[in-house]
Amino acid sequence: MGMQTAVREGSVDQEVGPRDDAQLILLVRRGDHSAFEELHRRHHAAAVRLARVYVGSYHSAEDVAAESFGRMYRTLCNRAGPETNFRAYLFTVVRRVAAAVNTLRAREELVDDFRMFEAAGGSYELHSGLGDGVIGEAFRALPERWQTILWYLEVEGHTTQTAAGLLGLTPNSTAALAYRARAGLRAEYALRMAL
């Protein structure tokens, strides 16, 4: 960190050392966006390292860190959050965001919707366009994007990471899309079974 020049009243320049986190937090609360950029530079690598401990992959850790910094920025702009120890507060936010990501992943890995539907809905052929049965009708009632992600993951057997590449999304976005698509398929299936 280099020395910064501050202009004081009477046009006298004076050298000022690097600002500490408490000063930067105060400046962010006053609307100085460059102060938050400085906080981001100081603490980003540590946030990614911590996120990687909780979520594993580098790309997911980057997503968790980005979301955490976004929350920190909104908190500070709303005049809430830490007064001095930015990193400790940030680490708490990282842990919470990572926990939410892991919860989503756990739901993703524990639910095996198509096998449940196979057992409940009789015989149909997934590989022949899902047939004309209840599950086929439910599948075709979904938005095209949901059909695509379910097809990639459940029929073709792609991983979330591979499907993300095929869809041009991040793995986290792909997991969230798959979760919504599965919930939508369950709802459509339940609706048809109730008729």
Image (cartoon, rainbow, N blue to C red):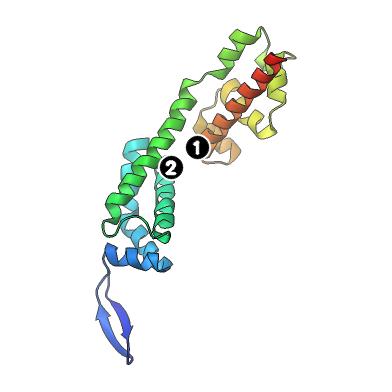
Residue 59: mark: 2
Question: Percent from the top left, x then y, of residue 55?
Answer: 37, 36
Left or right: 24, with 179 as reference point: left
Q: 155 or 11, which is in the foreground?
A: 11
Residue 171: mark: 1
From this view, report whether residue 36 is shown above or below residue 2: above
Q: 99 or 78, which is in the foreground?
A: 78
Task: Name the image quarter holding residue 52.
Answer: top left
Task: Name the image quarter holding residue 136.
Answer: top right
Residue type, numbered disc 1? Pro
**What is the CA distance from the residue labelled 2 to the residue labelled 1?**
8 Å
Q: Is disc 1 placed on a helix, strand or loop?
A: helix
Which residue shows up at 59% across the image and 8% down it? 119
Left or right: 138, with 64 as reference point: right
Q: 160 or 195, which is in the foreground?
A: 195
Question: Percent from the top left, x then y, of residue 15?
Answer: 25, 81
Which residue shows up at 69% across the image and 32% down it? 143
Residue type, numbered disc 2? His
Left or right: 71, with 39 as reference point: right
**Badge 2 vs badge 1, beta-carbon distance below 8 Å:** yes
Q: Quadrant of the C terminus?
A: top right
